[in-house]
Amino acid sequence: MINELLTRSVELENKLLKFLALKPHIDTEKTSSSRIMCSIAFEHAESAKILITNGNFTSAIAIVRLQYEALVRAMWLFYAASEQDVSKLMCELTSKSANKANTLPMLSGMLANLEGKAPKEAMDMLLEFKKYSWRPLSSFIHGGIHAINRHSKGYPLSLLIQLLKISNGVSTMVGMFLVILAGDFKQQGKIPAIQSEFSDCLPEYKK
């Protein structure tokens, strides 16, 4: 079953990656930095599937948290960051500029900044992810009880299936956000159609 889901997930990813080719409706540092983070999120999603295929499940779980963080950063840059904040990430990389960039808000701060600025549907999904998935995923990042237990005793198939669906859900949100950046009304109906086509490999969001 996991191999079938991996195959379907790759098919979904290939459809969503096409939205990266959309040009932003306004070419600014905000849109450019957001699109870069979207590309990074897609890279993390691809890496997670490769890691699962190779049996590196602990690393796969950790990288899905990075995928989620990349999406939050992309949305924060567009909806909530100041021009000064964006410039801290888009300038040339030096030790001085890296120190300045380290002053930018982390995940909880970005989510707080996004409240009332990002679309409510998107915020609901971001906050639901954080509520149900953030702590377990962080445990894998930091070598906590989840990492120790699962790596030593094995990973249930149900957990791997859930992980893939979560990653696919984040990728779908990235696709939605790229459509928003493009401001292309002709693209808006494509995401719901993709969600319907690939409902078997997406999570069910709680109401």
Image (cartoon, rainbow, N blue to C red):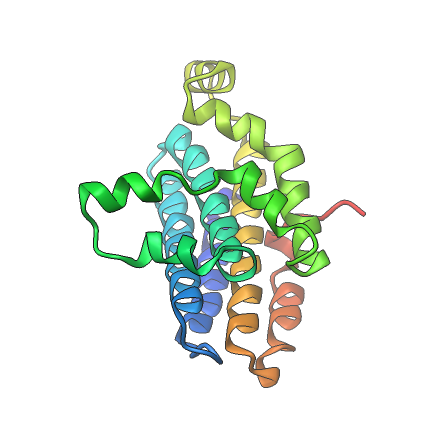
Q: Nearer the viewer, residue 146 or 83?
A: 83
111 or 17, nearer to the observer: 111
Residue occupying the point 64% across, 58% down: 118
Tell me if residue 95 comes above or below residue 118 in the rendering.
above
Q: Which residue lies furthest to the left in this view?
A: 94
Q: Vertical placement of 60 versus 37: above or below?
A: above
x, y percent for residue 4: 50, 51
- Between 148 and 107, the one nearer to me in the picture: 107
Give how far across and how far down residue 108 sits, in percent: 57, 37
Task: Locate the N terminus by quadrant.
Answer: top right
Q: Find residue 24 and report its image quarter.
A: bottom left
Q: Which residue lies furthest to the bottom in this view?
A: 186
Q: In which quarter of the image is residue 189?
A: bottom right
**Residue 16 as seen in the image, left or right of residue 99:** right
Determine whether 171 is above or below 149 in the image. below
Left or right placement of residue 68 versus residue 196 in this view: left
Tell me what residue is drawn at x 21 percent, y 50 percent.
93
